[in-house]
Image (tube, grey):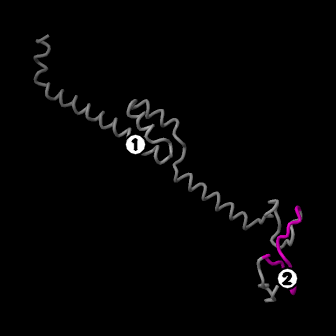
Amino acid sequence: MDAIMEPLQQYMPGILLVRNLSLLFFAVLHVALGFWTWRDAQRRDAMPWFWALVSLLFPFAGWAVYLVVRPPETREDARERELEIRAREAELARENPVCPACFKPVDKDFLICPSCMKKLKKECTNCDKALRLEWSVCPYCKSKQ
């Protein structure tokens, strides 16, 4: 056995250095996976401490499971999507008004809803234009209502 080990003795410091650097690399990678998992789960509202612990206890398997079951979008992405939906709904409401009572489409000049008979607007006493219910003056002919 000594005959085999004796020629390797000159390379032993290099072998130990490679081993120690490899162990250091895997330790840093292990901690980095746990930290990355914690940060990603925090951004996605997905129990960050639990997933960080799983990825630290089971380094590559826990991280792989997290990648499979994590929520598909971050908190910011979900908020942005909700804002886009609200903006589009507001745009559609401006373009195509609906009755506040029955939510059926109505024209902008309708005084009442043809479906549920809800009063939508009032008629100007002077020029007969459709006015909002809260207006006290007609913007078309300047007459008081």
The answer to which of marks 1 and 2 sits earlier in the sequence is: 1
Amino acid bearing label 2: Cys
Residue 85 pos. (x, y %): 64, 57
Instruction: Say if the magenta span includes residue 36.
Output: no
Q: Secondary structure at mark 2?
A: loop
Disc 1 vs disc 2: which is toward the camera? 2
Q: Secondary structure at mark 1?
A: helix
* Residue depicted at 73% across the width and 64% down the height: 93
* Residue depicted at 18% across the width and 31% down the height: 17
Identify the residue under disc 2.
124
* Residue depicted at 81% across the width and 89% down the height: 143
Relative to 34, 131 lies left or right = right
* Residue depicted at 83% across the width and 77% down the height: 130
Residue 32 pos. (x, y %): 35, 40
| Residue 80: image tag | none
Q: Quadrant of residue 142?
A: bottom right
Relative to 62, 114 lies left or right = right
Identify the residue under disc 1.
36
Crowding at dot 2, Cα within 10 Å, few <14 / some 14-19 / many 20+, comes out as: many
Relative to 81, 137 lies left or right = right
Crowding at dot 1, Cα within 10 Å, few <14 / some 14-19 / many 20+, comes out as: some
Region rendered in magenta: 115-133
Q: Nearer the viewer, residue 12 or 46?
A: 46
Amino acid bearing label 1: Trp
Above/below status of 139 relative to 19: below
